[in-house]
Amino acid sequence: MLGEHNLSNILACLNISEILNINKKQLINSLINFKPLKHRMEVVYKKNSFMIINDSKSTNLDSTNSAVKSFKNEIILLFGGFSKNELDEDEIINITKYKNISEIICFGQIGKQIYEILKNKTKSVLIQNFNDAISKSIEVSLNKKTIVFSPGFKSFDEFKNFEERGEHFKKIIKSYFV
């Protein structure tokens, strides 16, 4: 499982198991065999150090921050979607504090606003269409940098929900790497 937040959850499980006298071997076996839920830091493709991550469930900036800080290596961030609220510029700029982001691909209904905030702060590009944004991420990753789809916004500009968006993402990725 990827992410500091998952490490915190594992530590909580270990502490609770201690209190409840749960067999440690059973617990560790369960943790080793645990399959994360779909669309939550889900590894869609991995070859050597190149990975593609589906974090479609990320519908707020806190979850995108958690996703980004989970990686030490360089990443391409797919960032955008739908928002009916005013953007908080400081929260958007906060994403740029992570030095592992080599490029941010802004997409969706909110993409242009995000891009306008980020264009002078970090390497970023605006690609309105989700499919084209995925293609661009593959192109710039050079099969070396991890692609992290952690949009930080809702899916309603193109999809019914985050599940549909995540499944669509996986389908497009599989068309490139199968």
Image: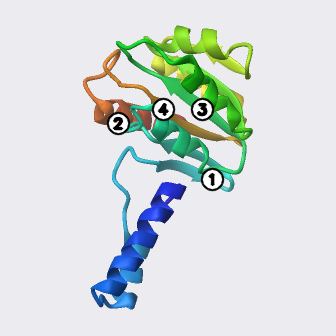
Mark 4 is on which residue type? Leu
| Disc 1 to disc 2, C-alpha distance | 20 Å
The first of marks 3 and 4 along the sequence is 4
Q: In the rendered image, which quarter is residue 170 located in? A: top left
Image coordinates for residue 2, horizontal then vertical, percent: 52, 56
**Residue, disc 2:** 167
Residues marked 1 and 2 touching at CB (< 8 Å): no
| Disc 3 to disc 2, C-alpha distance | 18 Å
Image coordinates for residue 73, horizontal then vertical, percent: 72, 48
Q: Which residue is at 60% across, 32% downward? A: 77
**Residue, disc 4:** 61
Q: Nearer the viewer, residue 21 or 149?
A: 21
The first of marks 1 and 2 along the sequence is 1
Image coordinates for residue 48, horizontal then vertical, percent: 67, 56
SS at mark 2? Answer: helix
The first of marks 3 and 1 along the sequence is 1
Residue count near mark 2 (Cα–Cα under 10 Å), binned few <14, some 14–19, many ≥20 = some
Q: Which residue is at 37% across, 68% downward? A: 34
